[in-house]
Image (cartoon, grey):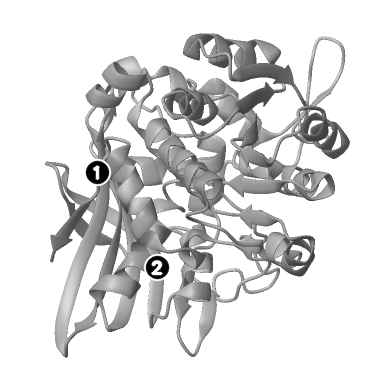
Amino acid sequence: MRVLLVGAGGVGTAITRIAARRPFYDLMVVADHDPARAEAAVAAVGDDRFRAERVDAGDEAAVAALLARHGCDVLVNATDPRFVMPLFRAAGTAGADYLDMAMSLSRPHPERPYEECGVKLGDEQFALAAEWERAGTLALVGMGVEPGLSDVFARYAADELFDEIEEIGVRDGANLTVDGYDFAPSFSIWTTIEECLNPPVVYERGRGWFTTAPFSEPEVFDFPAGIGPVECVNVEHEEVLLVPRWVDARRVTFKYGLGREFIETLKTLHLLGLDRTDPVAVPGADGPVSVSPRDVVAASLPDPATLGGRMRGKTCAGTWVRGTRDGRPREVYLHHVVDNEWSMAEYGCQAVVWQTALNPVVALELLATGAWSGSGVLGPEAFPARPFLDLLTEYGSPWGLREQ
């Protein structure tokens, strides 16, 4: 297998450090718009299977040419969601497989944003599924931790733990703190704003997908490994758009443990219009400069990838499932916990980006060995869960199951 990894930020760098310990590929080209970042990621692993390149993720022709020049079989997208479609199309043009950790962006319904879906997450990609299937190539979408591992958990629950499923609810929480900062998100603030301020999507059998107001249906969920109770709220997320395509459940939700202070900060950003992506004119020394308010917010905060040494605590990703088995009610929480102290000591990566990066590497290995195979645009639920979970444990990062 020959891989083109686009994006050498926190997650991309973590992918290189995890992949460097595995033998399943021959080449991994690490490409970024900033060549220094790509070169640093490659230099850190000290492995001659890695090469650094410069590429603009928004330049489809340049990405397709890079895939062809290195004879890459698969493109791994480790950029933010704005670049999903150009990279997706570039892989299709080059005849390469494609893997991402998020999906094409949504657009709220113009008149009823908190009742009806407009353009849903992934709609642009699924609209091209037939083309990918005819070409015999695979786009594995939403293959991070959430979405990704959480979807694998949903498939595992359906295959091995339940006869009928009433509800699948992804629940994400952490007790991470960052020394020296009052506000320092542990993941991309650009992506966090996109997820948290867009109308959340809920799925119900018979009704399909619909939306609610941001931060709706608060609940307190008790997370394992000493994290404890965290208030979780509805957030727009890919799992709700992916799980019902392959797993039969009456209801599917995603709730994120944001915390009251974080929610109020996001609401303030929205109130001030600082969550907007459309450029505004800002006075500059040489005249007006056009900038996106959200990009300004992101540039004003510390890079999450650099915060690992200041972070304390654990992060938990997981899937809560309620249904019946052998005629009896059952409720479980399948989960994966990463301690920041461990991920920093073992890989030099903070817990949230390392946990996100782990899963696409596991998926690549399953594709390389043939344990997973397919064509078209598919989510993690389209593949058997057991090989993934077994390999995850082999990587030294086991998962857990808690009966509720």
Assign a secondary structure to mark 2. Answer: strand
Q: CA distance from mark 2 to mark 1?
A: 24 Å
- Front position in the image: 205 or 217: 205
Specify the amino acid type for callout 2. Thr
Number of numbered discs present? 2
Residue 234 at x, y percent in the picture: 40, 61
Residue 314 at x, y percent in the picture: 23, 35
Circle 1 sits on which residue?
398
| Above-or-below relation of 274 to 89 | above
Q: Residue at x 84, y 48 (%)?
A: 93
| Quarter placement of the N terminus | top right
Residue 386 at x, y percent in the picture: 34, 59
Specify the amino acid type for callout 1. Pro
Circle 2 sits on which residue?
253
| Quarter placement of the C terminus | bottom left
Quadrant location of residue 163?
bottom left
Q: Is residue 263 left or right of residue 291?
A: left
* Mark 1 closeness class: few <14, some 14–19, many ≥20 residues within 10 Å: some
- Front position in the image: 181 or 359: 359
Q: Residue at x 38, y 83 (%)?
A: 250
